[in-house]
Amino acid sequence: MLQQLLLLLALMGGFLLLLILFGGEIWTRVWRFQRKRRMARLERYRPRNMWRRLRKKPVYEVDLTTIRDFVLTLQLSLSLAETLAGALVQASRQFGERGTFGERLTVRVRSQLQVEPEAVIRALAEDFSSPHMHELADRLDLAHEGGLSYSEAVNTTLDDIEEEIRIGVEKEIERAPVMLTIPMIMGVFFAALALLGYPLIILMFDAAGAAQGGR
């Protein structure tokens, strides 16, 4: 009985040792992941955005997928020989019911399209603080000056957005095992602890009962 008790204690000690050895690396990965998430949240408080808040100018939020769909709509319209102004009008109709982005797009088209179409993109970039929209506005300004065509400017921006989306999906796939590791370890740890501890408790009670019976 003493040998069985020592064997169980040795098994529990080995399990705890493995948890200590490999748990450090796992916690390091989780810490890095959480640090990236915190940095992404702190990005909202950049000086430019803080200055906007001080001026009480709202900073709207939009997901990258919506921006991708918007640029894709411009691409399709331009491929049908539409002007940039016509493409923006078509996009405002299509996105009119699509949340905040559609509302701001409609407002910008109505207020600034007659000035110049590029001003609509620039205003949207400022509204949503979107680097991709800023890049699109810069490329459209270059196209307006004759450096390249509007279609090339839109296509290049669309390629950049799709590449970023692809990289983001790959990162999420890489993060999934890290996020699942902790629940798996906790489940295995408590299950193993229960399996090892139950016989140990039984042996201890048996040993105590045998000791009292011997008296």
Image (cartoon, grey):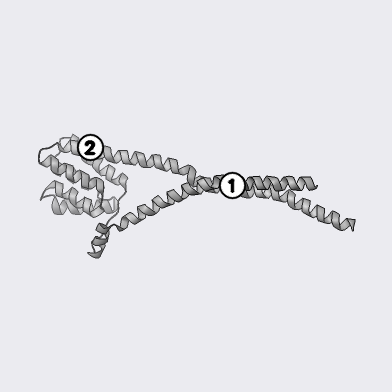
Please tell me whether residue 177 is drawn above or below residue 58 in the rendered image.
Answer: above
Residue at 24% over, 57% down: 48
Q: State left or right for residue 106 relative to residue 171.
A: left
Residue at 16% over, 53% down: 110
Residue 86 in view in this figure: no
Comparing marks 2 and 1, which lies closer to the viewer?
1
Q: In this orientation, which residue lies closer to the viewer: 81 or 46?
A: 46
Please tell me whether residue 190 is drawn above or below residue 166 in the rendered image.
Answer: below
Q: Three-letter amino acid code at disc 1? A: Leu
Q: Three-letter amino acid code at disc 2? A: Thr
C-beta proximity under 8 Å, tags 2 and 1: no
Question: Which class describes the residues within 10 Å of circle 1: few (<14), some (14-19), or many (20+)?
Answer: some
Q: How many marks?
A: 2
Task: Identify the mark nearer the N-term, 2 or 1.
Answer: 1
Residue 130 in view in this figure: yes
Q: Quadrant of residue 175?
A: top left
Q: In this orientation, which residue lies closer to the viewer: 201 or 88?
A: 201
Q: Which mark is residue 156?
A: 2
Q: State left or right for residue 117 relative to residue 62.
A: left
* Residue 12 image point, x, y percent: 67, 47
Q: Which residue is mark 1?
A: 19
* Residue 149 image point, x, y percent: 14, 36
Q: Which mark is residue 167?
A: none
Residue at 25% over, 52% down: 129
Question: Which class describes the residues within 10 Å of circle 2: few (<14), some (14-19), or many (20+)?
Answer: some
Residue at 43% over, 49% down: 32
* Residue 132 image point, x, y percent: 25, 45
